Image (cartoon, helix red, strand yellow):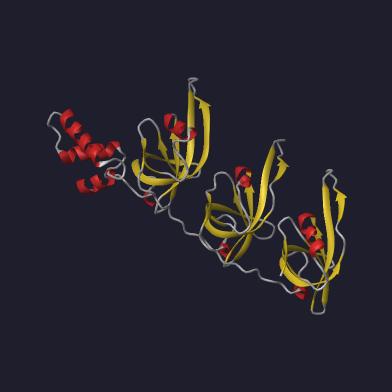
C-alpha cells in the first residue's frame, strides 16, 4: 500500500485537517529525520493501517501482527477474571466480519471495557490491530496492550452468502436468509443443574423449503413476528427430530431484513399422509366440535377442539390445541381451512403443535 493509498484510508478515519496536523507534528518531533512519506507510514501504523492491513479470509496460523477493517456482528461474551497475582482482568469476545469473511476477536482489559460500556457496539465498523492465535474454535485475533481499535467512518458490508435451507446438514455452520412462517411463544425450562432457561421455536422458510429453528436464551426474547425475514450469520445446524434444524443463541448474529423471501407451503393430500410425519394440509370443514378447557399435570389450563376435514372421499379428524383451538368459534360447515405444520398420529388423525398455523382460505 503506497503513501497515497494510506492517506486515502486514513481520511476515512480522521479529517484532512487532523491528518495534516499529525504529519506536521510527526516531522517536527523527529527533528528533520522524517519526511512526509515516512510520517504518513508512522501515523498509518498508529491508526492500524499499514502494509499489514489484510482481509479476514487471508488470516492463517502464520500471521502474526495484523490490521484489518471489519464490522462487529455480535458480542459473544464479556467477563471478568482474576489473574494468578490476584489482579483483576476483563476479556470480551466479538464476532466481526468484512467483505471476505468472519473472525473471532478477543479484547483484553481496557479494550474489553469499551465493549462493556457500550462504546464498541454491534453494527459499527472499526480498524482492528492485534495478533493471531490458535483458539478452541480456530484462529482468533487477540488485541491487548499492544493493539488498538479505531472507529471507521465508512461502513463495512460483511460477506453474507446464504445457503438454501434444503441443503443444510447437521454439523454445518452457515448463513441463512429465511422468512419466519411460524413462531411459538417463549417457554421456560429447567436445566440438569437446576438453573432456569428459556427457549423458543420457529419455522423458517425460503424458496427451497422450510425447517425448524430453536432460539435459546437472549435470542428467544428477540422481537420477532410471523412474516419477518431474517439474515442469520453462522447459524449452527444440528440433527433434530428426523431432520436438520437450526440452533441460535446470543452469539448468533440475527437481523430483521427488508429483503423479500418467497415461500409457498407444499400441501399433502389427506390420502397420502404418513403416521409420524409433519405436514401441511388443506380441506373442507365437514364436522365441528366445541372448544373445551382442561387442566394439565403442571396445573396450567389448556384448550382443545376437534374438527373434521374432508378432501374428496377422505374424511379425517383434526385435534386443535390451545391457541389453534380458538378458530372453531369462527368456523362453519363448508369452510376451507389450511393447517401448516401439523402432526400425523395413529388413526390416522391430525394434531396441531406449538408451531402449527390454522387459517381460513
* Residue nearer the viewer, 136 or 347: 347
Q: Is residue 62 visible?
A: no
Residue at position x 72%, y 35% in the image: 194
Q: Residue 108's quadrant in the figure?
A: top left
Q: Position of residue 306 (x, y in %)?
A: 84, 63
Q: Residue 128's quadrant in the figure?
A: top left
| Farthest-out residue, left | 32
Q: Position of residue 42 (x, y in %)?
A: 23, 37
Residue 255 in the figure: left or right of residue 332:
left
Q: Residue 346's quadrant in the figure?
A: bottom right
| Farthest-out residue, top | 86
When the figure is inspected, residue 24 is found, relative to residue 275, above or below; the finding is above
Residue at position x 43%, y 52% in the image: 158
When the figure is inspected, residue 289 is found, relative to residue 132, above or below; the finding is below
Q: Position of residue 14 (x, y in %)?
A: 29, 40
* Residue nearer the viewer, 233 or 9: 9
Give the quadrant of the C terminus: bottom right
Residue at position x 53%, y 38% in the image: 77
| Farthest-out residue, bottom | 312
When the figure is inspected, residue 237 is found, relative to residue 103, above or below; the finding is below
Residue 30 in the figure: left or right of residue 239:
left
Q: Is residue 275 visible?
A: yes
Residue at position x 71%, y 43% in the image: 188
* Count of marks overlaid on the render: 0
When the figure is inspected, residue 116 is found, relative to residue 171, above or below; the finding is above
Amino acid at each position: 500500500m503506497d503513501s497515497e493509498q494510506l492517506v486515502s484510508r486514513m481520511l476515512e478515519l480522521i479529517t484532512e485537517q487532523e491528518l495534516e496536523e499529525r504529519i506536521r507534528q510527526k516531522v517536527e518531533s523527529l527533528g528533520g529525520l522524517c519526511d512526509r512519506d515516512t510520517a504518513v507510514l508512522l501515523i498509518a501504523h498508529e491508526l492500524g493501517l499499514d502494509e499489514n492491513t489484510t482481509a479476514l479470509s487471508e488470516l492463517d496460523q502464520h500471521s502474526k501482527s495484523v490490521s484489518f477493517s471489519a464490522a462487529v456482528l455480535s458480542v459473544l461474551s464479556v467477563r471478568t477474571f482474576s489473574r494468578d497475582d490476584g489482579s483483576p482482568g476483563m476479556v470480551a469476545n466479538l464476532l466481526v466480519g468484512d467483505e471476505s469473511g468472519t473472525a473471532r476477536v478477543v479484547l483484553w482489559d481496557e479494550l474489553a471495557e469499551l465493549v462493556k460500556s457500550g462504546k464498541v457496539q454491534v453494527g459499527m465498523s472499526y480498524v482492528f490491530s492485534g495478533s493471531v492465535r490458535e483458539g478452541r474454535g480456530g484462529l482468533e485475533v487477540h488485541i491487548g496492550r499492544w493493539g488498538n481499535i479505531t472507529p471507521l467512518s465508512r461502513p463495512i458490508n460483511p460477506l453474507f452468502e446464504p445457503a438454501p435451507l434444503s441443503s443444510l446438514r447437521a454439523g454445518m455452520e452457515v448463513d441463512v436468509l429465511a422468512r419466519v412462517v411460524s413462531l411459538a411463544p417463549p417457554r421456560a425450562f429447567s436445566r440438569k443443574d437446576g438453573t432456569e432457561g428459556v427457549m423458543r421455536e420457529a419455522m423458517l422458510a425460503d424458496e427451497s423449503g422450510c425447517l425448524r429453528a430453536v432460539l435459546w436464551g437472549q435470542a428467544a426474547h428477540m422481537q420477532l413476528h410471523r412474516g419477518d425475514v431474517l439474515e442469520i450469520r453462522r447459524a449452527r445446524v444440528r440433527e433434530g427430530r428426523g431432520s436438520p434444524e437450526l440452533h441460535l443463541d446470543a452469539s448468533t448474529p440475527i437481523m430483521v431484513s427488508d429483503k423479500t423471501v418467497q415461500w409457498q407451503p407444499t400441501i399433502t393430500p389427506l390420502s397420502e399422509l404418513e403416521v409420524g410425519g409433519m405436514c401441511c394440509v388443506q380441506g373442507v370443514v365437514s364436522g365441528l366440535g366445541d372448544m373445551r378447557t382442561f387442566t394439565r399435570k403442571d396445573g396450567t389450563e389448556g384448550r382443545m377442539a376437534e374438527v373434521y376435514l374432508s378432501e374428496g372421499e377422505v374424511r379425517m379428524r383434526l385435534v386443535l390445541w390451545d391457541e389453534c383451538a380458538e378458530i372453531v368459534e369462527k368456523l362453519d360447515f363448508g369452510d376451507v381451512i389450511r393447517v401448516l405444520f401439523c402432526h400425523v398420529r395413529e388413526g390416522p388423525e391430525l394434531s396441531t403443535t406449538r408451531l402449527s398455523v390454522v387459517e381460513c382460505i
